[in-house]
Amino acid sequence: MFTANTTLMLVATFLPVLGALVLLFVPKGQRRIFEIGSLITMIASLLLSLPFWFGYDRASDAVQWAGAWTWIPALGVKFSVGMDGISLLLWLLTTFIGPIAVACSFKSIEERHKEYYIWMLVLQTAMLGVFITQDMFLFYLFWEVMLVPMYFLIGIWGGPQKLYAAIKLFLYTLAGSVLMLVAILAIYFLQHKVTGAYDFSLASFQAMAPVIAQQSKTYQHLMALAFFIGFAIKVPMFPFHTWLPDAHVQAPTAGSVILAAILLKMGTYGFVRFLLPILPTATKELLPWFIALALIGIIYGALVAMIQKDMKKLVAYSSVSHLGLCMLGLFALNPYGIKGGLFQMINHGISTSGLFLAVGIVYERRHTRMIADFGGLSKTMPVYATIFMIMTMSSIGLPLLNGFIGEGVILMGSFQAFPWAAVVATLGIILGAAYMLWMFQRVMFGPITAVNEKMDDLSLREVLYFAPLVAAAFWIGLYPKPVMDVMDAPVRKLVEQVTPGFHAAEALAAKQAAAAKLGMQGMAAPAHHEAAPAGHEAAAEGHAAHEAPAHETPAHGGGH
Amino acid sequence: MTGFAQGLLAALLRDTPLITPQIFLMTVATLMLWPGDLFFNRNEKHKWAPVTLVILAVTAFLVTRVPDGEGFSRMFRMDGLTRGFQLLCILASAGAVLLSVKLLDSLKQQTVEYYALILFSLSGMLFLCGASDLISIYFSIELMAICIYILVAYLRDRATSVEAGMKYFLLGAFSSGILVYGISLLYGAAGGVTTNLADLNQALALTPTTSSLLVYTGVLMVLVGMAFKVAAVPFHMWAPDAYEGAPTPITAFMATAPKAAALAAFLRVFGTGFHGVSSDWVLPLCYIAGASMVLGNVAAVKQESMKRLLAYSSIAHVGYMLLGVLSGDPKAGAQAVWLYMLIYIVMNTGAFAVVIYLQGKGEGERIEDFKGLGRKHPVLAFAMMIFLLSLAGIPPLVGFFGKFYLFKLAIEQGFVTLTVLALLTSAVSAYYYLGVVKEMYFKEPEGEAIPMGAAQVFIVTVACILVLVGTAFGPWLLDWAGRIFWV
């Protein structure tokens, strides 16, 4: 039924909820047991997930470690799991963030420990589950289950406005996902009409793309909008972002970390996995609107972040801006854009969770997050200041750190597709540097007040949970190739799904460009030997090469 | 003359097996009133609850043994639809009986009449599930409803209970009048020869166009009468007051059992009898279903009384279930409605068990009485949370599965706008269900926890487990639902 590897993947995914079941039977007062127990569970899940990074076949674009188990045959529902490179990265990001989120809660959670750690573990399994399912029904199940633990994490252990923030998060996401459910069902029945079979598998949904493309424009646009709204609320894209600042500000630090690092990625993952491959034609038709919303998000998020007085709110709005950039990359619909968008999702997960942790540190010590209450912290907390600086630099895209690579690749991709959009996005990046550095300056430098002088620097536990994030930021910044390689084949497949014949057209264009170059030099040597490898390079070079594929793609695509 | 008598006797002997469960129920309930009442003295009346449960179990067994067939001048049919919904009614009644024990004890209101009335009412429901003639539908509804009017007003010392019973009775009688008038119009329009649903379907198809207005009016009046019985908007006004005033176990009973029976009749009347004239009723029923979802869910948001909240939520759930009645494929519609009703009975009875537990100390009427239940009684609060989330349709709880199956059918049948409305209003419903969850978990408790009765523990535990794991057994549920069919 399942191979050993698939079983291991399932064990890593469901281990947290098993841990939660065990903790359920521990009496309430045992604070330490809950803390250590959930940390061990998270770490065990992380260790179990690591072999998949090494075992992943980077040359293949197929779903790996696939396994399926018939569940409700009458409806075509299967318990079907498996991962490709894109899922793998986000799945690993989730197992990576899990232990950090638990470790940062030891001090800040003062009451009801049992419930807290149980909800954390349940949430972890729900999130991991989203990334491994290969069945739409199962996906929807995990997708919604995630909301319940998050609702409790914010509602019980959150700030003063926690009730409002929790219900807002719940209802916004629920409203979006029920629309998505209608679209899923509509495609399911269309598929039944065409093939005569009921099938919820992701592969069969993706195979429906050509059939959907033949439906009426209204049908396609409605389907695309239903998916779009469902995912855009989760990302969140402007104008669906209003739940995010509330949720982030009210959530406990760990909640913010998970929200920023994983939950928001569910939305972008949804775009990559569902909207783009299932509804490519409709997506392309609505693309100007999507791009416009992404750009508004980038600029609006940055401008609103700039005027924030609360550090956590500032970081929250910076997420709106950064995820707008991710979406811009994905909507470029070319390999650079999509890879950059995915890559930036990972980076945002690392740097923003680092920033939320950093804000949590001062909040634990002073019970305030107002920028005005701080100043000169670098004098009393040098270690903290250093880590804060690394995370800030990573967030604003300084070379050598992870953010730089992601932003660069996104800009390359979006410039190929929409040069003007890339220009606007650059403005957002500059603004991003401005508000982040401004916050850093106001918090870390300047005169120090008496209260702040008494603040302790990071403890060993705190350094330990920052360390993996710092290491990851440097590793990805210095040597991004392994991460890029994992995405290579699946992204290639995705681009091909969205624009059939894209790579062939690109290769052809590169060949012609090379031939033209050779022709100018007056040499008649055959160009086809170097056509393929030159393809990527030429496209990356910029304007001259960019012209060619832009003209060639539709012509070639139409030929099929 | 003897020939006629012989024929009658032969027909009776042939047809009686079809209604064995009803005959059994009525006989036993009558015997319970006298001489059964003499068995237990004043302080032992609570012993009638287990006796009633045994009677219900026997009835359920009889229902499964009755052969398929049609009888009594084709007034009653036994088929998959009948059997399936009869079992639902019995299940819901058993739930109500279990819920009653502790509450009636604490109110010192245990009587044999209470349980007998539930049984009489149930016999009406069993008739209604299989009624295949407008006349038999009408008298089954009356038998069912009159017993419930009395049960609503059962706590006769309480003004609210009597008022609720009175209100329910007046509006119920009014709606019955509308129903009968509609039936008479259809009888006339179809040539004055039949009220049998299958015959009516053919006769209505042959009516001349000059009487189309007559048919239209008749169908609409029957629709209004039936909508009253299931409390669909805009004919729902009686429901919140009746629900609030009635003893809480009867509220749980009213929200499930009579609705299951009335929906069975709904499915049969509109799926068989009026199938040919569906253009007359589909649009009005669409509006009724849509309005029930919207008003039920929106009005529930503002409620402070838990019973009223559940009353409005049951109006909304009826709105969802009417989607199944609308289905152009009556069989698939009946299966989806049956599945949804089964799931609804389980979660609703579970939720009412918790409400009744809180009432044990004079609370539970108001939503704020749930304050801090998560601290005082973690297991109970967890179960309540599961019921509420399931009512809201959050996966992977079984309530989601029921909704999913129903909405899937509605989309398949082309009611996309209505389904989107249903899904969006169910997102609204999450708001007020979570409002109760919020009270239980986010607020500090006051006072001490009290112990629960054994019957309540049983209901809460069983219902909670069923709701939690139900979706995993989806294939079984679909398999059962597949037996709900009729021709």
Image (spheres, coloured by chain):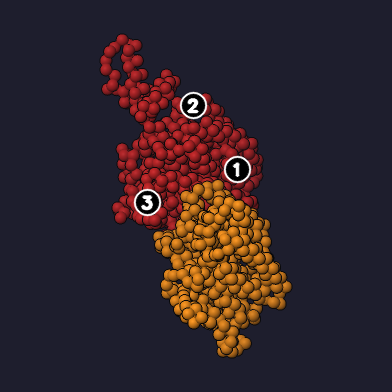
Chain colours: A red, B orange
Q: Quadrant of the C terminus of chain A?
A: top left
Label 1 marks a residue whose chain is A
Label 3 marks a residue whose chain is A
CB-based contact (under 8 Å), mark 1 and mark 2: no
Depicted B426 relative to depicted A537: above or below: below
Q: Earlier in the sequence, mark 1 or mark 3?
A: 3
**Residue B362 image point, x, y percent:** 66, 72
Q: Earlier in the sequence, mark 1 or mark 2?
A: 1
Residue displayed at 47% across by 50% down:
B412
Q: CA gap, disc 1 to disc 3?
A: 34 Å
Q: CA gap, disc 3 to disc 2?
A: 38 Å
Depicted A364 relative to depicted B15: above or below: above
Label 2, residues with CA under 10 Å away: few <14, some 14-19, many ≥20:
some
Same subunit: marks 3 and 2: yes
- Secondary structure under tag 3 reads strand
CB-based contact (under 8 Å), mark 1 and mark 3: no
Q: Earlier in the sequence, mark 3 or mark 2?
A: 3
**Residue A541 image point, x, y percent:** 41, 22
- For label 3, the residue is A80
Which amino acid, mark 3? Ser
Residue displayed at 49% across by 39% down:
A219
- For label 1, the residue is A242
- Secondary structure under tag 2 reads loop
Residue displayed at 57% across by 44% down:
A244
Give the number of the mark in front: 1 or 2. Answer: 2
Q: Is residue A51 left or right of residue B376?
A: left
- For label 2, the residue is A418
